[in-house]
Image (cartoon, rainbow, N blue to C red):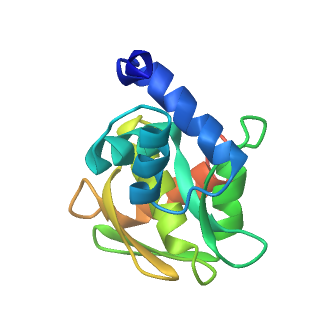
């Protein structure tokens, strides 16, 4: 089992993706235990970074329990984001995004990932509740442009959108 202990980060993330697709990964600590059974020792912080890098998120399964899932590569991330946005309102340097109950953290994670990779350049961070995401703009009066770019990002439309 020592061979698995020396996995590269790419190999480890591949194993994590496999475990998630098999189902039953309920939490980061549970993932750490599953990896240990496979002979891979990681900290919870490493597991958290790996989950973030994979784009994994928690979603309710058919029985209502939360499980980690990874979006199918054939499914557009922006399409799922569009399904989560009920409204976007701007004020000053903020955008307030309303989601269905339970959708805010998933949407906030998508916004954060895409602000880091440059797809949402005007966002610097989010705070998520249950059904509301607060998104902060890089500029003092950029809330309106931020709201517009969030709507554009979520719809997957290039260019302007009303």
Does residue 4 appear to the left or right of 65 in the view shown?
left
Q: Closer to the camera, 135 or 149?
A: 135
- Is residue 18 among the parts visible in the rendering? yes
- Is residue 156 among the parts visible in the rendering? no
Give the number of marks: 0
Q: Residue at x 70, y 79 (%)?
A: 64
Tell me the quarter of the picture where residue 162 sits: bottom right
Q: Closer to the camera, 143 or 20?
A: 20
Q: Whole-percent x and y of residue 29?
A: 39, 58
- Compared with 14, 86 (above or below) is below
In which quadrant of the rendered image does the N terminus lie? top left
- Compared with 61, 99 (above or below) is below
Q: Residue at x 40, y 48 (%)?
A: 32
Q: Whole-percent x and y of residue 80?
A: 69, 56
Q: Closer to the camera, 30 or 130?
A: 30
- Compared with 16, 153 (above or below) is below
Q: Whole-percent x and y of residue 157?
A: 69, 45
Outermost residue on the left side: it is 140
Does residue 140 appear to the left or right of 135 in the view shown?
left
Q: Whole-percent x and y of residue 144?
A: 42, 65
Q: Residue at x 62, y 46 (%)?
A: 20
């Amino acid at each position: 089992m020592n061979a698995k202990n020396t996995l590269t980060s790419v190999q480890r993330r591949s194993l994590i993706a496999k475990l998630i697709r098999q189902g039953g990964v309920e939490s980061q600590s549970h993932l750490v235990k599953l990896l240990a059974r496979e002979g891979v020792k990681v900290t919870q912080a490493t597991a958290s970074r790996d989950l973030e890098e994979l784009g994994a998120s928690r979603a309710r399964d058919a029985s209502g329990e939360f499980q980690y899932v990874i979006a199918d590569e054939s499914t557009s991330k922006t399409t799922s984001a569009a399904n989560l946005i009920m409204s976007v309102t701007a004020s000053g340097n903020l955008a307030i995004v309303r989601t269905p109950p339970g959708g805010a953290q998933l949407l906030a994670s998508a916004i954060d990932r895409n602000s880091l990779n440059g797809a949402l350049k005007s966002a610097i961070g989010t705070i998520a509740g249950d059904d509301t995401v607060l998104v902060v703009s890089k500029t003092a009066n950029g809330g309106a442009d931020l709201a517009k770019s969030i709507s554009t990002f979520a719809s997957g439309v290039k260019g302007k959108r009303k």
